[in-house]
Image: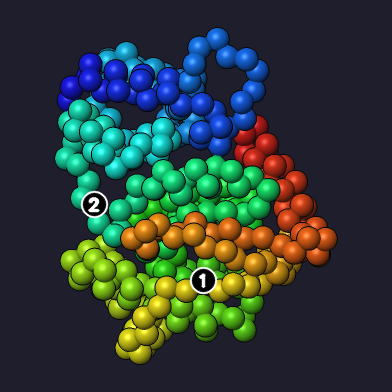
Amino acid sequence: MDQPALAAFLRTRRSGLRPEDVGLPAGPRRLVPGLRREEVAALAGMSTDYYVRMEQGRSPQPSEQMLAALARAIRLSNDERDYLYRVAGHNVPARTPQDTHVAPPLLRVFDRLEQTPALILSSLGETLAQNRLGAALLGDHSRHTGLARSSVYRWFTDPAERLIYPEADRARQSKAQASSLRVALGAAGPRSRAGTLVRELHKVSPEFTEIWELHEVATRFEDHKTLIHPELGAIELDCQVLFTEDQGQALLILTAAPRSEAAQKLELLAVLGQQQFTSATAD
């Protein structure tokens, strides 16, 4: 671990960012350029004290998970992320179609989506970023760990995962989940994380095994969705998707027609989400 290099790199990257670059409001006039240390810490999900010690070159070695969160928080390119890992004394993550480091151009679009639910997914259905409205509509996906980070795995192992869709739509969703996983497996091979998911799902889900034997292959998000919210009921939304060049990540944007019932429900959802966030903060 090269602490002086790590500290200098973090300081320069932070000073080169503006709040609007990472989806934060500009706020009052700032005395120094760049983001505040506490803002970077909040974006990365770590304590301000720990981040300050990193910038001062006196922190213990950060974990790979912490580095991944930092790389995302300060919008590092792949090359910059690799450098961050090296100076922190870790091996550089392999660049594969299932890389979970969010592409900065995709994050720049995501950061500007405040009025509608949005999330970024990996090819395995892992939620890499989710805005507040997305969490209010779909639930907070950051709580999931291990294999359950994949929506494909949750779909076939957790009955609660299906409640977001009308019952009549669930059979089609099962096929869509399996066929998208086959796309990921074809891109990464049987020894990849996609391969691990397939093997584990065969062990626990006869439904998955039956559908898997159909050998359907497709990455497709429906243009129109009906989603079920536990408090607001059915919400009809349009789904637009922006893929990275290698198709490894997708930005999903869910919108409602102007002045529609769904648009009114999204407005209510924004209020409910803010109340939930405020309550969680108070707790």
What percent of the width, then of the height, locates residue 14?
41, 23
Residue 1 figure quarter:
top left
In front: 278, or 43?
Answer: 43
Q: Is residue 140 left or right of residue 84?
A: right
In the figure, 68 relative to 179: above or below? above
Residue 59 figure quarter:
top left
Q: Secondary structure at mark 1?
A: loop
- What residue type is disc 1 on? Phe
What percent of the width, then of the height, locates residue 44?
43, 34
Q: Is residue 166 left or right of residue 44?
A: right
Q: Quadrant of the C terminus?
A: top right
Q: Which circle marks residue 156 in the picture?
A: none
Q: Secondary structure at mark 2?
A: loop
In front: 200, or 22?
Answer: 22
In front: 239, or 199?
Answer: 239
Q: Which residue is mark 1?
A: 221
Q: Which residue is mark 2?
A: 95
Q: Residue at x 33, y 60 (%)?
A: 246
Could one spot residue 248 in this view of the protein? Answer: no
What percent of the width, then of the height, locates residue 208?
38, 81
Q: Residue at x 47, y 74 (%)?
A: 220
Question: Which mark is first along the chain, 2 or 1?
Answer: 2
Q: Residue at x 63, y 72 (%)?
A: 225
Residue 160 figure quarter:
bottom right
Q: Residue at x 53, y 67 (%)?
A: 161
In the figure, 175 relative to 239: above or below? below
